Image: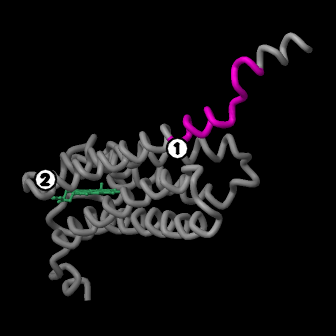
Amino acid sequence: MIAAILELPLWQAMRTMGMISFLAITAGVCLGIIYSMPVWSGAVKKKLYKIHSTLTIGGAAIGMLHGMISVIDTYTPFTWSEVLIPFTADYHPVLSGLGTLSGYLLLIVILTTDLRGKLGRKLWMTLHLLAYPAFIMSLVHGFFLGTDSSNPYIQWIYAVALSAVLLTTLVRATIRSLAAGKNEPPRAAVRKEGRAG
Ligand code: HEM
């Protein structure tokens, strides 16, 4: 049985899973940003949230499986402790450690999602923002460690992924500042109110 598992193309499966995980996490992060734009109706928000959480949880799970396969696979030289304790691997300790750390950060983001009421919005939000370093860490890890990164198509995937996260962040910041401007009273009215009070 174990021999049969080791016969499987594990290294290829591991690399494919790394890429699928990265893409799902990227799409999940972008949808989280899009979800928080103050433009959606309740029904659209509900749908966006469902896809956002499915992609993020699915991506994190596949990323963890990818890390586990790196131990089982005989081509990649990892022990369980090297995979579980960041920066302790003999093979590219920093780049491998970023993969592990990214997995842990995603786990924190996912596990604290249902605790929003208990943690309070401020603490929950601070923890949720760990999704950004998790995304950057998985990007650096995948790009600099991945065999496929020499392929121009794969390089495009990383460039598009980074641009998508930056662009959605920028669009949301613009929409939020426009919305805040609309809700602010005109300056003259504020001055008059000040004098009257
Ligand atoms: C959520 C966490 C993770 C994500 C999103 C992720 C993502 C990726 C991606 C996109 C690649 C590039 C695949 C390729 O082009 O070949 C990759 C490669 C790699 N990852 Fe991860 N990874 C994660 C966690 C881990 C962990 C915990 C380890 C083990 C320490 C690990 C070990 C590796 C190795 C050794 C490679 C190079 C495979 C090769 O091409 O030879 N990764 N990862």
Q: CA distance from mark 2 to mark 1?
A: 27 Å
Q: Identify which residue is drawn at 36% across, 68% down.
A: 62
Q: Left of 143 or right of it: where is 28? A: right
| Relative vertical location of residue 105 with respect to residue 43 in this rendering, above or below | above
User: Residue 31's x, y, as percent?
Assistant: 46, 58
User: Residue 196's x, y, as percent?
Assistant: 90, 14
The overriding secondary structure of the stretch rendered in magenta is: helix
Give, as a three-letter code, the residue at label 1. Answer: Leu
| Front position in the image: 35 or 81 | 35
Q: Earlier in the sequence, mark 2 or mark 1?
A: 1
Q: Where on the picture, by quarter, is residue 122?
A: top right
Q: Residue furthest top?
A: 195
User: Residue 3's x, y, as percent?
Assistant: 19, 84
Give, as a three-letter code, the residue at label 2. Answer: Ser
Residue bearing mark 1: 129
Q: Quadrant of the C terminus?
A: top right
Q: Quadrant of the N terminus?
A: bottom left
- Report whether the residue tagged 1 is closer than 8 Å to ligand 1: no
Q: Where on the picture, by quarter, is residue 78?
A: bottom left
Q: Which residues are magenta?
A: 175-189
Is any atom of residue 71 visible in this view? no
- Report whether the residue tagged 2 is closer than 8 Å to ligand 1: yes
Q: Where on the picture, by quarter, is residue 7?
A: bottom left
Residue 56 circle label: none
Residue bearing mark 2: 149
Marks 2 and 1: CB-CB under 8 Å?
no
Q: Identify which residue is drawn at 32% across, 46% down.
A: 97
User: Residue 159's x, y, as percent?
Assistant: 22, 48
Say whether residue 148 is magenta.
no
Q: Quadrant of ligand 1?
A: bottom left
